[in-house]
Amino acid sequence: MALIPVTILTGFLGSGKTTLLKRLLSEAHGQKIAVIENEFGEENIDNDILVTESKEQIVQMSNGCICCTIREDLRETLQLLAAKKRKNLLEFDRIVIETTGVADPGPVAQTFFMDEEIAETYLIDSIITLVDAKHAPQQLNDRQEARRQVGFADQIFLSKTDLVSKEETEALTHRLKHMNPRAPIKAVHFGEVPLSEVLDLRGFNLNAKLDIDPDFLKEEGDDHGHDHHDHDHEHGEHCNHPSHQHDHGHGHHHHHDDDVKSFVYRSERPFDPAKLEDFLGAIVNIYGPRMLRYKGVLNMKGTERKVIFQGVHQLMGSDLGPQWAEGEPRMSKMVFIGIDLPKDIFLQGLEQSLV
């Protein structure tokens, strides 16, 4: 049986997740989707559609989609759905998991790496993060979960851009790219995205394409160090609330020093496989909880093929990709997205893992 693709949907309250889910569960899109909801908040799908007597909390919708609430464990819910599908009791082609507004999508993604039975049935397609353009600057300042959700994303949708100025949208986009240069950022109207842009994005595929926003790489040269201004200290001692420490309206000045950051490593010298494995094993051991997403296409000594690796937190997987083409420069390229990762330790360790 082909693996069932899974999309993980995350984002803060008010970002339009509900609108998107309601569409999945009611529109005539011809896809049979099982939506797994992580507990019902105020804001979620109308509870009246979901009043069921059964203990299992699985409801069939008018368009053939299924909705189920998780009361206990995601793993058990996934196993139950797979068992029902095998017995032809339920029909669905894919799953969308909505995480609660404050959740870290990491453990949800890890479930698919760790559990063999789950890994043999399902495949993560991508993590999509919805960002509310109006409230994001404040949320990103005040809530680490909001920053983590950005770091995890394979695709970012900005909603409510009609409620803020073009400059504010640009400043926010610029900030998000620094946190996550891998995820394309698209403005959408209140969660109303064409489904083709939500499903089958293959953000978790171990493919040789390393998506790093090209604009982000252009800026590597102009270091943002000198963009920091001293106005953070104008408010006197009593003000320690993160939102009060930035005055806005500076356009592109990148003075939000967010703890979720990314950096890219490149080298034209090949890696020594044993050294690299030891080094990556060691950093994942120490920094795993703070490493959100990392991915690379590597030039390894001893193989004519590209080596592709990626990970979420402590879990890492790698695979042999296609051969290096005739005349293609054999360059390793890696991106790390995480919370206050010690860039110099990483870069030094990677340098020392080269042949």
Image: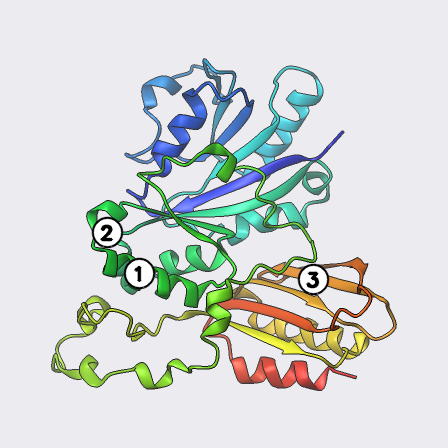
Q: Position of residue 308 (x, y in %)?
A: 72, 61
Q: Position of residue 21 (x, y in %)?
A: 41, 31
Marks 3/1: CA–CA distance: 32 Å
Position of 307 compared to 5: left or right? right
Mark 3 highlights which residue? Answer: 309
Position of 183 compared to 236: left or right? right
Q: Position of residue 94 (x, y in %)?
A: 59, 30
Mark 1 highlights which residue? Answer: 170
Mark 2 highlights which residue? Answer: 134
Task: State yes or no: discs 2 and 1 in contact (Cβ < 8 Å).
Answer: no
Marks 2/1: CA–CA distance: 12 Å
Task: State yes or no: discs 3 and 2 in contact (Cβ < 8 Å).
Answer: no
Frontmost of labels 3 and 1 is 1
Q: Quadrant of the N terminus?
A: top right
Marks 3/2: CA–CA distance: 36 Å
Residue at x-position 40% and y-position 27%: 23
- The disc, 2 or 1, on the residue closer to the chain's N-terminal end is 2
- The disc, 3 or 2, on the residue closer to the chain's N-terminal end is 2
Crowding at mark 1 (Cα within 10 Å: few <14, some 14-19, many 20+): few
- The disc, 3 or 1, on the residue closer to the chain's N-terminal end is 1
Q: Which mark is residue 271?
A: none
Considering only vertical position in the picture, is 283 above or below 30?
Answer: below
Position of 136 compared to 215: left or right? left
Dot 3 falls on a residue whose secondary structure is: strand
Q: Amino acid at mark 3?
A: Phe
State whether residue 290 appears in this view. Answer: no
Dot 1 falls on a residue whose secondary structure is: helix
Q: Quadrant of residue 306?
A: bottom right
Q: Quadrant of the C terminus?
A: bottom right
